């Protein structure tokens, strides 16, 4: 992933359904060489030949990767700023150009995997600006830097072991084995474990080349969305209108119900009717109860397997509609709300943690666990329960929990 915004950084730690390995941990006192030796031993036991293990011998920690991995942005972008950054006129125009250029191939992918062309174009555009920004960091070096120490150590070790398998497969030469600082690779930015599990050879040339072949990269993305639960003929989501007196405790991506049940509660589509045939869905409030509401379908959750940030999935959905010819949607955002600063989020997390709520790490990132804890706090204190962190919510938490 090449984006520097906080929503992307939030998702990087669990990108594409990552399952962390329980590898040995190294303190700063241990040498990088010793860590490399342990990786080689583990890789050798897993069947990696010596000629590929030798690629590790010249590696050194990359200072820039360490800096990017530890960077803490000054503030978190509000969702409306994030969308403005992701859905630009230039990106829409480029996406439409690529949609036309790859029309026949994209149609074949849709028949095989069920994923609409606009969704694949949106992912390609958001990940690498249609292949223009794929990342220039040597993958092994970047992953070794992450794996040696720091909060991404388990991720880095797991991914470098997978990367060695890719190198041994012959799908990519060492000189071309490059990606983002976090080890995501190719046109559609797969991490090594995801590549091993879901990349496909869409051209039939015997290689899964996501680095130089848009066809293989787009086919791989379509395959990954398909196995992640994509349902053909179902939209990624629709904007909805909530009835007066709606119980916001029912919202949140963890609260899935049949579409028919949401309809019985008086929820209606804002631009198009909801259909019970879509199956399950959840009510997603990207900016709390004062902003727009969306019905997130099964396909929204499939996109979340690609990147676990809900803001990313929303952007993919909205951008795909624009690329496919839809008009810009003007939404009423609560833009008077400023985002909480990282230190304020840490304070909020600390107070909730002390009160017994499960928020994970006190890291200044309002991820899913923090949002769920805010929602629980709001429910238990008879507040509007939307799980959305604002200065007002922090003030309420201070008042009640201090």
Image (cartoon, rainbow, N blue to C red):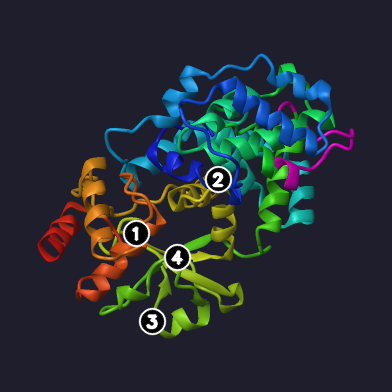
- Which residue matches tag 1? 371
- Which residue matches tag 2? 15
Q: Residue at x 30, y 78 (%)?
A: 247
Q: Earlier in the sequence, mark 2 or mark 3?
A: 2
Front position in the image: 363 or 313: 363
Q: Residues within 10 Å of mark 1 (few under 14, many from 20)?
A: some
Q: CA distance from mark 1 to mark 4?
A: 10 Å
Image disc number at residue 266: 3
Q: Earlier in the sequence, mark 1 or mark 4?
A: 4
Q: CA distance from mark 1 to mark 3?
A: 25 Å
Q: Residues within 10 Å of mark 3 (few under 14, many from 20)?
A: few
Work out whether 333 lies above or below 342: below
Expressed as whole percent of the image width and height from the top left, the position of residue 298 reads 58, 65
Kindly check if marks 3 and 4 are in contact, taking CB atoms under 8 A apart as contact. Answer: no
Q: Earlier in the sequence, mark 2 or mark 1?
A: 2
Which of the 4 image quadrants contains residue 171?
A: top right
User: Which quadrant of the figure contains the N terminus?
Assistant: top right
- Which residue matches tag 4? 253
Q: Is residue 4 magenta?
A: no
- Dominant secondary structure of the residues highlighted in magenta in the image: loop
Range drawn in magenta? 195-212
Q: Give the side of residue 138 with respect to residue 382, left or right.
A: right
Q: Disc 2 vs disc 3: which is toward the camera?
A: 2
Front position in the image: 350 or 372: 350
Expressed as whole percent of the image width and height from the top left, the position of residue 379 reads 26, 74
Confirm whether residue 179 shows in the render.
no
Q: CA distance from mark 2 to mark 4?
A: 18 Å
Q: Give the side of residue 272 with respect to residue 395, left or right.
A: right
Expressed as whole percent of the image width and height from the top left, the position of residue 219 reads 74, 43
Q: Residue at x 53, y 79 (%)?
A: 258
Q: Disc 1 vs disc 4: which is toward the camera?
A: 1
């Amino acid at each position: 992933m090449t984006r520097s915004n906080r929503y992307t950084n939030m998702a990087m730690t669990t990108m594409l359904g990552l399952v962390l390995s329980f590898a040995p941990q190294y303190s700063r006192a241990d040498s990088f060489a010793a860590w490399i030796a342990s990786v080689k031993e583990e890789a050798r036991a897993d069947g990696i030949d010596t000629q590929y293990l030798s690629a590790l011998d010249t590696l050194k920690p990359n200072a820039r990767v360490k800096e990017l991995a530890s960077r803490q942005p000054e503030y978190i972008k509000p969702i409306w700023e994030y969308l403005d950054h992701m859905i630009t006129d230039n990106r829409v125009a480029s996406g439409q150009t690529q949609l036309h250029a790859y029309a026949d191939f994209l149609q074949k992918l849709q028949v095989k995997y069920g994923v609409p062309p606009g969704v694949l174009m949106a992912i390609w555009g958001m990940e690498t600006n249609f292949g223009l920004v794929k990342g220039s960091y040597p993958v092994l070096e970047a992953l070794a830097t992450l794996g040696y120490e720091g909060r991404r150590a388990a991720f880095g070790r797991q991914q470098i072991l997978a990367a060695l398998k890719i190198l041994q497969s012959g799908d990519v030469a060492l000189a071309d084995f490059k990606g983002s600082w976090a080890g995501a690779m190719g046109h559609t930015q797969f991490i090594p474990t995801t590549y091993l599990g879901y990349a496909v050879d869409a051209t039939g040339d015997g290689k899964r080349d996501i680095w130089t072949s848009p066809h293989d990269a787009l086919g791989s993305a379509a395959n990954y969305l398909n196995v992640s639960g994509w349902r053909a003929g179902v939209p990624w989501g629709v904007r909805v209108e909530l009835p007066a007196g709606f119980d916001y405790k029912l919202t949140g991506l963890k609260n899935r119900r049949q579409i028919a049940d949401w309809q019985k509660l008086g929820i209606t589509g804002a631009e198009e009717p909801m259909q019970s045939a879509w199956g399950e869905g959840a009510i997603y409030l990207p900016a709390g109860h004062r902003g727009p509401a969306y019905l997130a379908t099964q396909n929204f959750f499939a996109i979340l397997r690609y990147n676990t940030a809900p803001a990313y999935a929303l952007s993919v959905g909205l951008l795909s509609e624009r690329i496919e010819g839809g008009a810009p949607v003007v939404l009423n955002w609560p833009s008077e709300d400023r985002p909480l600063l990282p230190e304020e989020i840490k304070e909020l997390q600390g107070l909730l943690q002390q009160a017994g709520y499960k928020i994970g790490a006190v890291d200044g990132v309002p991820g899913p666990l923090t949002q769920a804890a805010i929602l629980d706090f709001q429910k238990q204190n008879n507040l509007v329960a939307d799980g959305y962190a604002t200065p007002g919510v922090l003030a309420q938490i201070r008042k009640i929990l201090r």
